[in-house]
Image: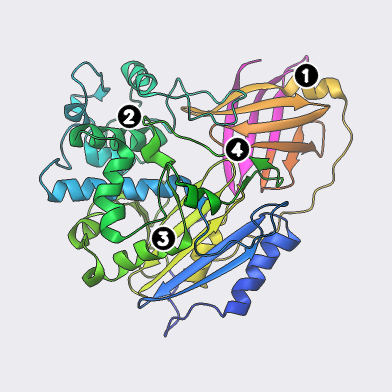
Amino acid sequence: MTISAKVSRKPNFQFPLETEIKSILAARVDERRQAAGIVIGTIRGGKRNIIGYGRFSLTDARQPGGDTLFEIGSVTKVFTALVLTTMVRRGEVGLDEPVKDLLPSNVRIPCRAGQTIRLQDLATHTSGLPRMPGNFTVGESKDPYSSYTVDDLYNALSTQELPRDIGSKYEYSNLGMGLLGHALACRAGTAYETLVSDRILCPLGLTSTAIVLSDDMNARFTSGHDFELNTVDSWHLDESLAAAGALRSTADDQLTFLDAMLRPEKCRLTDAAADMLAVRRPTEILGIESGLGWLIDGRNGDDLVWHSGATAGYSSFVGFSREEAAGVVVLSNTANDISDIGRHLLNANAPLSPAPKFRAQIAIDQLRLHAYTGCYQLLPGVLAKVTTRNGRLFAQVTGEGNVEIYPESERAFFAKVVDAQVIFEANGDNVATSLTLHLNGQTFPGSRIND
């Protein structure tokens, strides 16, 4: 793991010129073809600027702008955490309150060493719960979250065992944040979307942020695209996991949200917003902490506060620096990660991701491809599913899009649309027993669990 040294920020901070930002967008959309359309919004001292580039889709030439809606995926988690701190301020819940106290009495919540999971453990991803529920499967569904119900959530919790003490280690968990939002909605006696609307969206005037879209919002909702720019269906998260990633929003609304974080005197939720950064837990990367909902990166001289999101067809970033009084939102209608752009705009020392390395594709026997198909366990609740279709090999990580991978040797494969490589290990019969996924500089080994 590479740890970045602290780097002093430039004095008299300014965002890059609009021409420079447009050149970044042109590289992603036109040259690398890593997005159909991207919108970037910046704000400082209440002054905002929005730059849109590309198209709604390959068949819709409208250019996305500040009022275009995107799925914002896991940025939803920030809103869930803010709901938590508003409810704490009202005395409706406590950060140290066990989550089981908010749920029906017959729901079993896993415990360990005499400890029970508290609300702040869920909000900081230190509950010990895995990334995804053990009974969540993607299968062939194009909308895998829509059929995962509250009963499924309760069933997963009833059999879940915690691998470590609560609060001892950071592990990013959609399950944990989904459970948090559901529990808060139970305490409030309403649905999650209603709770977010009443506590966050209406007070801040975010009129184009929702889970269920009106006709007007749908007309402004851009199409989502997978890594290869194929149009994909939108995701619809059931109440069970809605708090982990169900919101859709615009750059205009997200800049209004950032303005509230940056200028407390303009925010009706001042204390609750500040509370999100008061609780901090270490993550697996030195210098990066988990607040309530937010990630806090202190490696470059100040606290860069941010969160990113990804669904099958969209990618998002929302972040701010209080020292620079600056905020950035980046929304893309394609699954490729764009969070590096957001961090770079907030700190020029944070590099942009390089163009994918050129790799040479070779021909390979079709029987060898079938020997690699199956499911591989990467992390608790996270699988890599390898399939073949029309003589081509595809890999899909739980909750992510299906990506074609191409052979550069008999056992080494690469993706063209994302920085990912897959290396297979095989037995004496040349049947794969495990794989190693190299993704965006990180390595994930996975053992085969079935065919």
N-terminal of the pair, mark 1 or mark 2, is 2
Quarter of the image where the C terminus is located: top right
Tell which residue pokes out farthest to the front in this image.
215
Q: Upstream in the sequence, badge 3 or badge 4?
A: 4
Q: Is residue 431 visible?
A: yes
Residue linked to disc 2: 164
| Secondary structure character of the magenta stretch overall | strand
**Alpha carbon distance from label 2 to label 4:** 37 Å
Name the amino acid, label 4: Asp
Q: Which mark is residue 104?
A: none
Q: What amino acid type should be assigned to the residue bearing mark 2? A: Arg
Q: Mark 3 = which residue?
A: 254
Is label 3 or label 2 in front? 3
Q: Position of residue 264 (x, y in %)?
A: 24, 69
Q: Earlier in the sequence, mark 3 or mark 1?
A: 3
Q: CA distance from mark 3 to mark 1?
A: 51 Å
The stretch drawn in magenta includes residue 112: no
Q: Which residue is tagged 4?
A: 233
* Residues rendered magenta in the picture: 422-451
* Labels 4 and 1 touching (C-beta < 8 A): no
**Residue 208: image location, x then y, percent:** 42, 55
How packed is label 2: few (under 14 Cα within 10 Å), some, or many (20 or more)?
some
- The residue shown at (66%, 48%) is 419
Callout in the foreground (4, 1): 4
- Mark 3 and mark 4: span between their CA atoms? 23 Å
Numbered circle sitting on residue 430: 1
Q: Looking at the picture, which amino acid does disc 1 mark?
A: Asn
